[in-house]
Amino acid sequence: MTRSRTRRTSRCDLLLFLPSLRGGGAERALLGVANALHVRGVRVVLVLARAEGPYLAEVAPGMPVIDLRSDRVSRCVLSLTREIVRWRPRSVLSAMRHANALLVVTTTLARLFGVRPRLVVSERGHMAAFLATDHSPRAARATRLGGMLYQRADAIIAVSDDLAQHVRDELGARCPSVVAIPNPTITEELLRQAAEPPPHAWYGHPDIPVVVAAGRLSSEKGFDVLLEAFAHVVRQRAARLIILGAGPLLEPLRAQAARLQITAHVHFPGFVPELGAWLSHAQLFVLASRAEGLPNVLIQAMACGVPVVSTDCPTGPAEILEHGRWGPLVPVDDIDALASAMRTVLDTGAPALPSHVLARFHPAPVAAQYAAVLGIPLDADVSSACVSERRAPVTSTDAVG
């Protein structure tokens, strides 16, 4: 099936499968769950279709990482099945619909070898809204296939209450248990970064506020609408816009900024690992998305003390902001409403945010909820050795299938 470079076989509590750690919000969120569980004494094995990406450096010391060395998730059927049989996990978990579909298939195959882990998949986004922005055949196939295979799961974890209801509606009568658990978004690393000095010369000018947005540069994130709205703002007051992230629309967005004659006021730094520093020194964070699951960066901005404006897109922003209590919610694709909300918050600021509003997004409570759904008991006491182990090496297998 596959040829492993290590002969050690040991049962684990949780096998987590992800395509990579290239920098997406889903990957970082699930890695955060895995790290939090690892610190609590859970034996976690992280299996990656390809072990690459900036978040590899954030894997908890001592957690085994298996590299299937495949450029496509669909080619990992046999190699992932081998790892499930090899590790005999109590539970398996994945995120993103194409990876979830593969995990359902491989877990079914592993049962032929007498391995029967609890199968849990994590749904990260509103698929109907996503398909409205991605019309590719691949997206449609992944949606149909995932929907059919999800019925074989023991449980589905959705990242927001609204998304959980959407999954129930999509799957209908054969839907397994769906539980809403938020992402472990507010980490010690984020708060440490927030205390760092400003990362760019645009910060520190009180008369020229900095507006920050962040996310993958793709259609569903609505950065084209943000640029239009920001052009309205700078016609009336001085301001600068920093858009963090990488993606296929970088050059079109730069061209749009040039057409709007705001190039001098907009900066695209690309992907930045020290997100907290870029957020904490801004005067405003804007989420202009057309669709989300639970926008991590909106929560992170609030945790860094930044006033926020968001579209009322499906799903997540209304839950996070308690329907506008902690920041304005504007209709999706409404340029004038977004510009007006940005001007208002830049002029008046935002209400003080009580600490309890964001308490549920910290790693410890999230890990406890995941453990309950996965059927994994947590250690009451965690020794310091658990977080000071040497980092486990990445083990490679040859992915076939």
Image (cartoon, rainbow, N blue to C red):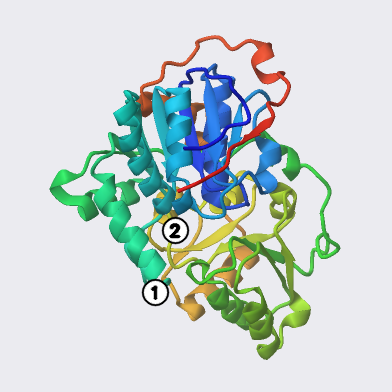
Residue 103 drawn above or below residue 22:
above
Farthest-out residue, left: 173
- Provide residue 227's location: percent of width, then percent of height: 61, 77
- Using the image, tell me which numbered label, if any, was put on residue 23: none
Would residue 314 appear left or right of 306 to someone viewing this image? left
Judging depth in this view, the residue of 9 and 325 nearest the camera is: 9
Residue drawn where x is 82% and y is 53% of the image? 198
According to the picture, the residue beneath numbered tag 2 turns out to be 292
Residue drawn where x is 39% and y is 27% of the image? 91
Residue 271 drawn above or below residue 192:
below
Q: Residues within 10 Å of mark 2 (few under 14, many from 20)?
A: many
Type of the residue with mark 1: His
Residue 171 drawn above or below residue 390:
below
Of circles 1 and 2, the one toward us is: 1
Q: Residues within 10 Å of mark 1 (few under 14, many from 20)?
A: few
Would residue 333 appear left or right of 353 to someone viewing this image? left
According to the picture, the residue beneath numbered tag 1 turns out to be 135
N-term-proximal mark, 1 vs 2: 1
- Provide residue 312's location: percent of width, then percent of height: 41, 63
Q: Is residue 369 visible?
A: no
Res 324 → quadrant:
bottom left
Farthest-out residue, right: 201
Q: Is residue 371 visible?
A: yes
